[in-house]
């Protein structure tokens, strides 16, 4: 029996499930909406969908490295409560999701969500919360490159760094430095132009309104603006930040001493940038 658009819409309105899930359920029962609802409930899809409007801002970050295949993945999975985030079941879910991403190497978040949706639906049935794969990155090491990884506060913050070569204990130390310093960029040259333009406008306003600089020549004011902008942006650049094991040295100095370069890095902190609703 062919399933109509109206039937799919009616089922979706009652369960909150996805279009394709509704279509498949209706096809299984020849268009009987009540039976289709039962199928969705049995699969946990309706229950999971009913929680879609909740905000998931707790959770864990996780890292896994596969030296044999040369891949590494860093991931953030969110849940609704801190209680669930500390449970063994949730830790197992995060491990499962991390393994799926490492094995399948999805190229987009949409693809990753599709790969992990069954694991999340089952977890919602078991734990009664909304779970979200918020973000992930898969790195690929080549030509002798190596990874450094570090997780802090039982997975609340994690850092993953890809290095041009293996430097033993320094690998992890650099990942720890990334976790501690929270850099946004590797060097000033990596700062996006729109960020620099925004900071430049702020600095120009500050210089223009500073009574001590009123009589300074325009070229001097321009130099002051550049210095102010570089100072602000440098605070977010890893290369000039202090090394975690010797704060008298910058990361750039440590890299030079060891003849190694940072190819790429990622730092995740659980829930950063997620706005939680006010408590009622």
Image (spheres, helix red, strand yellow):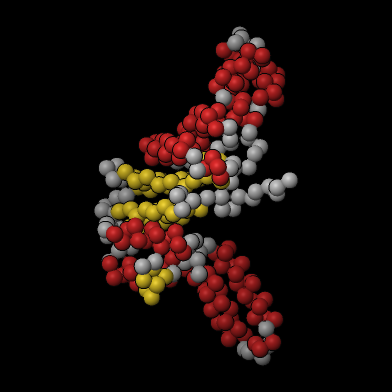
Q: Is residue 162 visible?
A: no
In the image, is 30 to the left or to the right of 236?
Answer: right
Q: Position of residue 261 (x, y in %)?
A: 33, 63
Q: Is residue 67 above or below residue 229?
A: above
Q: How many marks?
A: 0
In the image, is 100 to the left or to the right of 20?
Answer: left
In the image, is 31 to the left or to the right of 59?
Answer: right
Within the image, what quadrant is residue 251 found in?
A: bottom left
Nearer the observer, 105 or 182: 182
Within the image, what quadrant is residue 249 found in?
A: bottom left
The residue at 66%/89% (across/down) is: 212
Q: Is residue 213 above or below residue 252?
A: below
Q: Position of residue 64 (x, y in %)?
A: 37, 45
Nearer the observer, 64 or 213: 64
The residue at 66%/78% (across/down) is: 206
Q: Is residue 48 above or below residue 38?
A: below
The residue lying furthest to the bottom in this view is: 215
């Amino acid at each position: 029996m062919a399933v109509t658009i109206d039937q799919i819409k009616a089922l979706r309105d009652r369960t909150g499930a996805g279009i394709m899930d509704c279509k498949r359920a209706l096809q299984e029962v020849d268009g009987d909406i009540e039976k289709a609802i039962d199928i969705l409930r049995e699969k946990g899809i309706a229950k999971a969908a009913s929680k879609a409007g909740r905000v998931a801002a707790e959770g864990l970050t996780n890292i896994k490295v596969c030296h044999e295949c040369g891949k590494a993945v860093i991931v953030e999975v969110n849940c609704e409560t801190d209680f669930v985030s500390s449970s063994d079941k949730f830790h197992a879910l995060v491990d499962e999701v991390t393994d799926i991403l490492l094995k399948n190497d999805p190229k987009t978040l949409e693809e990753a969500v599709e790969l992990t949706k069954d694991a999340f639906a089952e977890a919602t049935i078991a734990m009664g919360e909304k779970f979200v794969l918020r973000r992930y990155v898969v790195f690929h090491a080549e030509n002798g490159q190596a990874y450094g990884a570090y997780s802090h506060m039982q997975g609340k913050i994690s850092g993953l760094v890809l290095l041009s070569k293996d430097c033993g204990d320094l690998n992890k130390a650099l990942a720890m430095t990334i976790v501690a310093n929270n850099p946004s960029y590797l060097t000033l040259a990596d700062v996006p132009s729109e960020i620099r333009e925004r900071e430049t406008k702020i600095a120009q306003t500050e210089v223009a309104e500073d009574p001590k600089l009123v009589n300074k020549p325009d070229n001097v004011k321009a130099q002051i603006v550049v210095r102010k902008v570089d100072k602000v942006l440098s605070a977010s650049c890893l290369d000039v930040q202090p090394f975690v094991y010797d704060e008298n040295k910058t990361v750039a100095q440590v890299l030079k001493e060891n003849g190694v370069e940072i190819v790429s890095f990622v730092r995740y902190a659980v829930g950063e940038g997620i706005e939680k609703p006010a408590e009622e």
